[in-house]
Amino acid sequence: MSAVAQARPLAGFRLHPRPRTTELALLALVAVTLAVGGASLGATQQLREATRTGVELSALDFTPPDAQGLLVYLGALITVHLAFVLAGRRTDQVLFPVAAMLGGIGLLLMQRLPQELVTQSFGSAELGLGQLQLAWLLVALTVITVLALFVRSDAWLRTYKYTWAAVGIGLLLLVFVLGSEVNGARLSLSVGPISGQPSELLKVILVVFLAGYLSENRALLADESTRIGPLSLPPLPYLAPMVAMWAIALGIVVVQRDLGAALLFFAVFLGLLYIATGRPSYVIGGLVLFVAGAFVLYNLFGHVQARVDNWLDPWADPQGAGFQVVQALYAFGRGGILGVGLGAGLPLIGGRLPVPAVHSDYPLAALGEELGLVGLLAILGLYLVLVTRGLRIAAAGHDEFRSLLAAGLALVIGVQAFIIAAGNLKLIPLTGITLPFISYGGSSLLANALVVGLLLALSDRGSEPPPAPRDPRRPFRRFRLGRARA
Amino acid sequence: MDGFLIILWLVRIAFLVLIYGFLFAVVRVLLRDLRAASRGPAELGRLVVLASPRGEPQPGASYPLDAVTHLGRDVNNGIVLDDPFASAEHAVLTYRGRNWYIEDLDSTNGTYVNGVPVEGLGPLGFGDEVQVGEIRFRLDRGHG
């Protein structure tokens, strides 16, 4: 092997370091914020312990409960940033810090909740809630980095959209057959020690499929050609495959009793259809369908009925079915404007947490109690920023597929955050769905990492300006000139 | 009131303030980006007519340039040159990457940049003078 070949082990992969000052500054702010939050959490927890045991207050300090975990997370953020800088792609600099901030707040929350809420042992090591969340966050950061650095072409998404759709449906069927049942819903698939919720992955696949299909048939769908009485419909043959895909996904999800995912799919489907065609009639028709479907579901399924009744009047059974909803509302009330402080909320009631699903379905209730209305609004603002940024990337997209994909991914995050936030606040019936980046859970974190990584890849404004034009007609001009001069 | 509790309260509030600080920093970046986008794409460059004895193009006129602009006597060119020494398709200006290039389209009497004849394709910097026949241009930076 020659020395030249050894010197370039990765032909075709060259480093073009390009500073990302905005991202670095925002990440520095994230680090400071999380450090202060950790200090606040640590001091509050020590204070609670001290008042119980009667230790002098002067013996307390501001060490975070899991300083090591926090440092690992911050170190991982800087590593990702350095990888972005070295690769030198001109991708968005805001998305990653915002996602990192939300993930960090989620990590603080998981470190603050009782660690025995979720435990998993690997060999002799027993990991608690905070450590597991940290591990999943690190995996999610890896996914973001890989996608943002190496996804350059979108052909592998665009070309194989039906394959992706089939993979998604297959995953769901697999869950339906082999999945394990939790709380009356067959959601998760267990492979060895690792279990996941494929419906989280399915939301990304659905957006890829819809973006691919709509970008190809947008003009046809926006065209009014079929008329049934006063209704003007788009050409039905072009609408059919998409509606079929949507109906299959929705049907399986309903059978699995995953109402949150069904709601999410429906909203994203309607949103993308509207973005692609610009026809309000689709949205109106979709809403009519939604009302009709909801009515049918309410009358057919007992668990839907229970959810809705529970939403309308949780105080009918405050110790039983309505317990969680009522306690979440009390938690928001206790929080008030400024909150009681990280670590000071969620008093145990009769030895158990007031909100049992606080780490997956109700993180917003805990944050609302401890950070108050002010903190809650800031967190919702962060989601708003993510959505705005995603739509901005969509508006700047090179072609329709990239635009629709970016818009759909932004919608997924926004709609999901809205559904669970509104559910927690009793604005709509609660549906079991995670709060993106904050909730505990590997599937949720990985799916949202996919979303952010794809958005970053889509936001690339072209790494290098194109080379100078070649002179096509006289390729050997220089050569001839040199000979003439010689 | 214990000092520890006061500091703890301050740290608590500082955490909230920092989240908002982050949010405002992000929003500032977004607004800056949106303003830059709303100004529209910046002009790539302008061609200012320095001398034109026959009045077509008008002396003193300045043309905003597209990424590819053709010069020549034919009326289909982006900039029409009324000059007996200009060919029907005389030269083309192209913008690639961050640079302008000029290419002589095998014209009869040639194209000159700063008095030097263009051989096929050559780079063109801002401030350079282009001469076709008796017409002289200068390439300027675009507005905005």
Image (tube, rainbow, N blue to C red):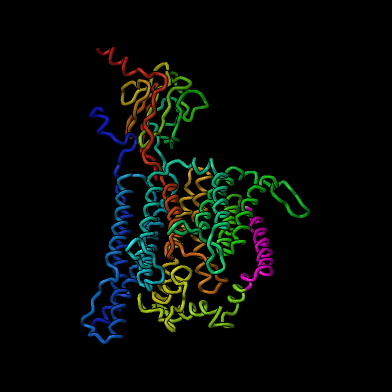
Most foreground residue, B113 or B123? B123
Q: Quadrant of the C terminus of chain A?
A: top left
Image position, residue A138 (x, y; %): 35, 57
**Any magenta on residue A422?**
no
Q: At 53% from the left edge and 55% from the top edge, which residue is drawn? A: A203
Position above or below: A338 against B40: below
Most foreground residue, A342 or B141? A342
The quarter holding residue A250 reads bottom right
Residue B66 in view here: yes
Q: At 31% from the left edge and 48% from the top edge, which residue is drawn? A: A85
Q: At 46% from the left edge and 24% from the top edge, which residue is drawn? A: B72
Position above or below: A119 against A226: below
From the viewer's perspective, is A319 left or right of B107?
right
**Any magenta on residue A294?**
yes
Image position, residue B44 (x, y; %): 40, 39
Magenta-highlighted stretch: main secondary structure?
Answer: helix
Residue B24 in view here: no
* Residue most extreme to the left: A58
Tell me which segment is drawn in magenta. A279-305
Q: Quadrant of the N terminus of chain A?
A: top left
Position above or below: A9 against A30: above
From the viewer's perspective, is A301 left or right of B89?
right
